[in-house]
């Protein structure tokens, strides 16, 4: 299995840490962490990660807007949305805008790994 490079995007340091732990434990490489959509967009261009985990609600630029910006830059971008319960409408919008999958907080390790493997196929 190739070591996939992941950019983790979330405004909450605790959430980034949880996700990072799951990813690293399962053989993924976390190449960067962004705290808002604006950072995510710039870091995507710099780091060219294989996958992005994108939080939906963030300051400055939310995850849906960042997703659309990244998809404009790279139509093959593999982005997994991270949503809280009750954000179904936004998740749907994200999927229609090009997100490959979504994971729900609190993160469950097997679900995160499944989503990663699915989008990397």
Image (cartoon, grey):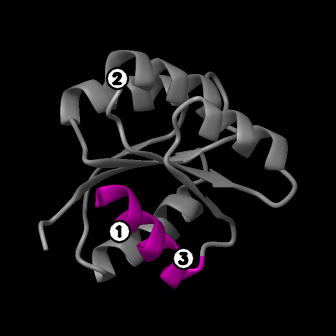
Point out residue 94 in the picture as x, y percentages from the top left corner: 64, 36
- Local packing at callout 2 (Cα closer than 10 Å; few below 14, some 14-19, many 20+) is some
The foreground one among 120 and 43 is 120
Relative to 74, does residue 57 appear above or below in the rendering?
Answer: below
Point out residue 79 in the picture as x, y percentages from the top left corner: 45, 44
Would residue 97 be visible to someone looking at this image? yes
Point out residue 58 in the picture as x, y percentages from the top left corner: 66, 36
* Nearest to viewer (mark 3 / mark 2): 3
Q: Residue at x 30, y 58 (%)?
A: 120
Would residue 62 be visible to someone looking at this image? no
Which SS class for mark 1? Answer: helix
* Nearest to viewer (mark 2 / mark 1): 1
Residue extent of the magenta highlight: 108-121
Read off the residue under disc 1.
Answer: 117
Point out residue 57 in the picture as x, y percentages from the top left corner: 71, 39
Q: Residue at x 23, y 76 (%)?
A: 27
Read off the residue under disc 2.
Answer: 42
- Local packing at callout 3 (Cα closer than 10 Å; few below 14, some 14-19, many 20+) is few
Read off the residue under disc 3.
Answer: 111
Marks 3/1: CA–CA distance = 10 Å
């Amino acid at each position: 299995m190739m070591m996939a490079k992941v950019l983790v995007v979330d405004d909450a340091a605790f959430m980034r840490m949880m996700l990072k732990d799951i990813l690293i434990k399962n053989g993924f490489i976390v190449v960067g962490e962004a705290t808002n959509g604006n950072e995510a967009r710039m870091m995507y261009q710099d780091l060219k990660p294989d996958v992005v985990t994108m939080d939906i609600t963030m300051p400055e630029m939310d995850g849906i807007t960042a997703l659309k910006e990244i998809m404009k830059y790279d139509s093959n971008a593999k982005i997994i949305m991270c949503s809280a319960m009750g954000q179904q409408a936004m998740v749907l919008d994200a999927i229609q805008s090009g997100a490959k999958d979504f994971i729900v907080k609190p993160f469950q390790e097997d679900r995160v790994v499944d989503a990663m493997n699915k989008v990397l196929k």
